[in-house]
């Protein structure tokens, strides 16, 4: 399966090697993590699809099992029998080369199979995946595809949390997805915003060969970057409140044309999940409603809002390559899915290093000014897996860095997320940049 080279760069593995236990263990740990994220939700909760961007929890559970069954078990495990052959179409997301798929907007109408049946489906797939990964049939292609499947499921873990938050927000009861956590002290300020300077020059960007990455992160190539400055932390709720108070949503000169149309069409006047209560601003979190903490990173912002805020602040959004160069030496640590807080936190102190950049990974995805386009030399894989990323390279903007619901082992400096510019239900925020002049 040579076409997999354009989906990911595998770790060196002999073509007929038996999978190491660590891959089987990582597979099972990933599957347990997904089940854990859904464990507190009722069957009724798992049916809800509250917006066009979202999917029901039950569908996330089924589709991730479908991925392993469709691309691995049905092709690489001799004698494998699908639990239900009809699931091949029912839980297909967008792979035209695989077959038909239902309209995404109808996913919340699938009362059957029930939740127990979906859980049995997951168990069926897990049993056979574990059998395959511990057998001599686990070829290099199987190992590569399993790595891809684990990363695919991690994407759906993030979406599961994002989607259920939106679903609970649309419920008039405003229930919490998780128990309330201690809110940040309103007396804890964010660190002073500073700028990290970068000199002009040729830089290498993209995923390093020999490590797992999605096809849209490759090939690694050189780009020329003029000098630029990169903000030391994301923009805060307090800074965004100043934008609101300065009539940011009423001043057309701050907005791109399509952004201004979106403001008018949707009646935007604040980030998603914010609402005014007297003199106070409240926001809906994964633990329910609470007062906006001005020191936290602002979250659930569209690209249009991020761009307008940057213009109001006398700055701009970084390009995705500026972001990557600024982040490439930063350790992947911070407020990520494993923290189980599912909400952005106040930036930590810089520990005396005025040049340090904070919250590069986790807390909020950071919009860049870069359109989501192929890198020079990009070629989508042959067959269905070529549909994973490449066919979405139109009318989308790139985000970098992960959020408070991104698994730690899933994110890296070269990772390219992408969404349409009106998207607000994601945990997305703002980091500023300028030309350093």
Image (spheres, grey):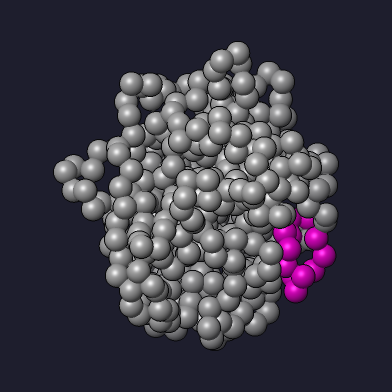
* Rendered location of residue 121, percent (x, y): 66, 50
Was residue 94 drawn as part of the magenta stretch in this picture? yes
Closer to the camera, 26 or 200? 200
Q: Is the magenta stretch mostly helix, strand or loop?
A: loop
Please give the name of the residue rendered at 64% of the width and 49% of the height, measured from the top-left corner: 253
x 39%, y 38%: residue: 339
**Which of the two residues, 263 or 378, is positioned nearer the viewer here?**
263
In the image, 238: left or right of 176?
Answer: left
Q: Which residue lies furthest to the left in this view?
A: 352
**Residue drawn at point x = 48 percent, y = 64 percent:** 319
Residue 187 location, x and y as percent?
A: 33, 21
Q: Where is residue 311 in the image (x, y as percent from the top left)?
A: 53, 50
Which of the pair 428/104 is nearer the observer? 428
- The residue located at (63%, 73%) in the rendering is 390
> Foreground residue, 258 or 37?
258
Residue 190 at least partly seen:
yes
Q: In this view, does 43 lie to the left or right of 39?
A: right
> Which quadrant of the figure contains the C terminus?
bottom left
| Residue 230, quarter of picture | bottom left
Instruction: Pinpoint residue 391: horizontal percent, then vertical percent.
Output: 68, 71
Q: Can I make out residue 410 in this image? A: no
Image: 196 above or below 248: below
Picture mark count: 0
Position of the N terminus by quadrant: bottom right
Residue extent of the magenta highlight: 90-101
């Amino acid at each position: 399966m040579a076409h997999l080279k354009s989906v990911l760069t595998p770790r060196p593995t002999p073509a007929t090697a038996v999978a190491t236990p660590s891959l089987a263990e990582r597979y099972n740990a990933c599957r347990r993590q997904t089940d854990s994220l859904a464990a507190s939700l009722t069957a009724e909760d798992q049916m809800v699809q509250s917006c066009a961007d979202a999917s029901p929890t039950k569908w996330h559970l089924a589709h991730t099992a479908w991925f392993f069954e469709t691309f691995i078990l049905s092709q690489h495990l001799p004698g494998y029998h699908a639990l239900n052959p009809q699931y091949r179409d029912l839980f297909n997301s967008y792979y035209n080369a695989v077959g038909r798929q239902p309209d995404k907007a109808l996913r919340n109408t699938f009362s059957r199979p029930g939740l127990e049946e979906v859980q049995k489906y997951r168990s069926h797939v897990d049993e056979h995946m574990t059998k395959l990964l511990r057998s001599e049939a686990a070829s290099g292609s199987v190992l590569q595809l399993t790595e891809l499947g684990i990363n695919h499921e991690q994407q759906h873990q993030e979406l599961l949390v994002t989607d259920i938050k939106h679903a609970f927000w649309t419920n008039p009861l405003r229930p919490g997805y998780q128990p309330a956590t201690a809110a940040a002290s309103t007396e804890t300020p964010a660190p002073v915003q500073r700028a990290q300077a970068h000199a002009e020059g040729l830089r290498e960007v993209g995923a390093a060969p020999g490590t797992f990455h999605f096809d849209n992160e490759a090939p690694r190539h050189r780009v020329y970057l003029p000098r630029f400055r990169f903000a030391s932390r994301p923009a805060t709720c307090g800074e965004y409140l100043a934008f609101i108070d300065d009539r940011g949503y009423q001043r057309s000169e701050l907005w791109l044309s399509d952004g201004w149309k979106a403001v008018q069409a949707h009646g935007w006047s604040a980030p998603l999940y914010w609402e005014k209560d007297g003199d106070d601003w409240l926001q809906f979190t994964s633990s329910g409603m609470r007062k906006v903490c001005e020191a936290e990173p602002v979250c659930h912002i569209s690209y249009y809002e991020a761009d307008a805020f940057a213009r109001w602040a006398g700055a701009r959004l970084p390009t995705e390559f500026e972001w990557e160069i600024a982040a490439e030496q930063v350790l992947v640590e911070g407020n990520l899915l494993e923290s189980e807080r599912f909400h952005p936190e106040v930036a930590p102190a810089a520990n005396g290093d005025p040049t340090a950049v904070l919250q590069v990974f986790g807390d909020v995805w950071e919009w860049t000014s870069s359109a989501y386009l192929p890198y020079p030399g990009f070629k989508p894989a042959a067959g269905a897996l070529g549909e994973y990323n490449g066919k979405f390279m139109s009318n989308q903007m790139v985000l970098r860095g992960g959020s408070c619901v991104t698994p730690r082992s899933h994110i890296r400096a070269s990772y390219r997320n992408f969404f349409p510019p009106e998207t607000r239900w994601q945990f997305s925020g703002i980091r500023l940049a300028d030309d350093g002049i």
